[in-house]
Amino acid sequence: MKTTLDIDDELLVRAKAASARERKSLTALIEEGLRLRLRARRGGGPARPLRPLPVYRGRSGVAKGIDPTSNRSMFDAASAPPHLHRREAPGQ
């Protein structure tokens, strides 16, 4: 179906550049964008299920072995398999 759209000049320049880079038509690029947007509106949710974030239920501070001044240490702790996040309550 043919239609006429009023598109912001800068957005159109960027869209044309993207379509040229990807070697696809401007129509194909716009259709892809509309499909993605409409799919998100239907409540399609994230592409992969989100896992729950680990929660430390100790008294205070970070868990043993985690350096709070190191991004790598914090990332590694957050990326560890969920069974490694289980902690025993104090006194057990």
Image (cartoon, grey):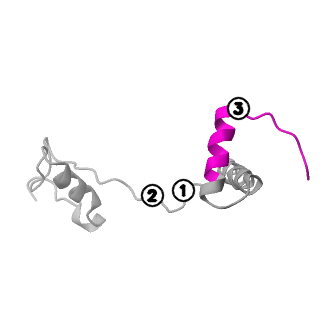
Mark 3 and mark 1 in contact (Cβ < 8 Å)?
A: no
Return the x and y of residue 64 as percentages of the image width and height: 9, 54
Q: Provide the residue designation for mark 3.
A: 8
- Residue 50 shows which numbered tag? 2
Q: In the picture shown, does residue 61 fall above or below 80?
A: above
Q: Nearer the viewer, residue 32 or 43?
A: 32
Q: How crowded is mark 1: few (under 14 residues within 10 Å), some or many (20 or more)?
A: few
Q: Which of 27 and 54 is in front in this view?
A: 27
- Residue 14 highlighted magenta (yes or no): yes
Earlier sequence position, callout 3 versus callout 2:
3
Left or right position of 9 against 47: right
Image quarter of residue 92: bottom left
Mark 1 and mark 2 in contact (Cβ < 8 Å)?
A: yes
Q: Nearer the viewer, residue 43 or 83?
A: 43
Left or right position of 7 against 45: right
Left or right position of 38 against 3: left
Q: What element carries label 3?
A: loop
Residue numbers of the magenta segment: 1-18
The amino acid beneath tag 2 is Leu
Mark 2 and mark 3 in contact (Cβ < 8 Å)?
A: no
Q: Is mark 1 on a helix, strand or loop?
A: loop
Measured Cα–Cα span from mark 1 to mark 3: 29 Å
The amino acid beneath tag 3 is Asp
- Residue 33 highlighted magenta (yes or no): no
Return the x and y of residue 18 as percentages of the image width and height: 61, 51
Earlier sequence position, callout 1 versus callout 3:
3
Q: Provide the residue designation for mark 1.
A: 46
Return the x and y of residue 36 as percentages of the image width and height: 66, 53
The amino acid beneath tag 1 is Pro
> Can the viewer see residue 44 in this picture?
no
